Amino acid sequence: MICFFHRKWKRQAMVLILIHSMATNMWSEIGENRLNPENIGGCELSRVYQSEINYNEEKLPYARLFQMIVRLENEHNIYISPVNFPRIAINFDSTLAPGLTTRTDLLKILIRFLEIRGFEKQEISLVTYFLDNITRKRLDTELPGYQILTSQSQEYFHPDWFHDSPMPPSMAYRAELLIKHPQNSEIRRNLGRKSLLPACLFLNDTYWVNVATAKDDPYLGINGAISSVSINGSSNTERFRKDSTLAPATATEILAIPELWEKQLFSIIDLSDIQIAGGADFNSEFNRNLPLILMSKNPVFLDYHAMEIIRKLRRQVGLMDKSTEDCKLFTFSKELGLGNSQQSEITNLSMQ
């Protein structure tokens, strides 16, 4: 077991500790064009691509996604194929489903791209922390035969990969542990400190693609691409959710785990459905629709520009302004070496 003391936050009298075991042969040879971790670490080279969603193309409204992925590949010197990346996990957002969730049409076009590149069904998995019955039935109908992994799936977590913190668990999680381990207080105490990570995204030969939505969040600033693969994808994280320092600190700490960070291919935020206020619950009053899609190699930069868009929409209806400059999510990301969001830029592919 190896302990990573990533950062002691000056704003908290607490050390956030990441404890995990190192997976052997993580970077086995999988082709001469395999992902170079040094390229991923070059956050300053990342940019955000923006393109329009064409609703006139009823069957292919997200057709521009092909152009965006190829552009990203060319600029980052990668080629997405089974030779270079044997398995792809598509992490999609269902935190506010069925009210607000990743659109099935977007998943379809992304899977179609992977199939054109030679991926078989068994090499693609759809991953989300929790799936309601309505959304699951829709996915089973529209995307039959693809593996869907949730936190209830045996493959989702791995016991050696977790975020360890002295923060006590929420009452709901404490009750769950009591039901599972009624006679063993030591196990309950041990598990209550741990937040299991979505290991299915990065273990073995798996690489992840992140498909998120954008939602205003009173503690994170934005609930989007960063949170989708960190605190929204891990267990026992409600203990962090309502703290304006611990929530962004935990989200960025998890994202910064080398094995998770280095296995990312790209992230997407679909702005066709966004929520500009209303907290952690779905609220149709604050739902807005923009025919735009954002993509980046860096989920931090993606969230930064999505939050700027939410900020403009909030101003239009007279809601309180929320500055990206004051958002701890981006401050902590910069301190952890995940990139300076203020130096990122948008490239509008619709104009090219």
Image: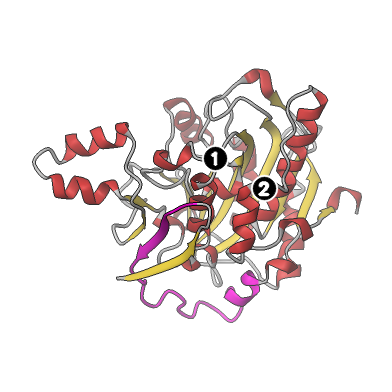
Query: Percent position (x, y) of residue 268?
Result: 66, 49
Q: Is residue 268 left or right of residue 129?
A: right
Is residue 297 among what the camera can see? yes
Q: Residue at x 36, y 71 (%)?
A: 23
172 up-or-down from 92: above or below: above
- Residue type, label 2: Asp
- Residue type, label 1: Asp
Q: Residue at x 36, y 69 (%)?
A: 3
Q: Nearer the viewer, residue 351 or 232?
A: 232
204 up-or-down from 133: above or below: below
Q: Which type of secondary structure does the marked residue at label 2 adopt?
A: helix
Q: Quadrant of the N terminus?
A: bottom left
Q: Nearer the viewer, residue 33 or 284?
A: 284
Which of the labelled discs sits on residue 93, or is there none? 1
> Magenta region, mostly helix, strand or loop?
loop
Where, by quadrant of the figure, is residue 252 drawn?
bottom right
Q: Residue at x 68, y 22 (%)?
A: 286
Whole-angstrom CA distance, mark 2 to mark 1, is 14 Å
Please name which of the two marks, 2 or 1, marks the residue nearer to the observer: 2
154 up-or-down from 20: above or below: above
Which of the labelled discs sits on residue 303, or is there none? 2
Where, by quadrant of the figure, is residue 108 drawn?
top right
Q: Nearer the viewer, residue 207 or 259?
A: 259
Q: Is residue 330 left or right of residue 145?
A: right
Q: Pick out the residue farthest to the top.
A: 285
Q: Is residue 226 left or right of residue 296?
A: left
Chain part drawn in magenta: 12-41
Query: Percent position (x, y) of residue 293?
Result: 74, 43
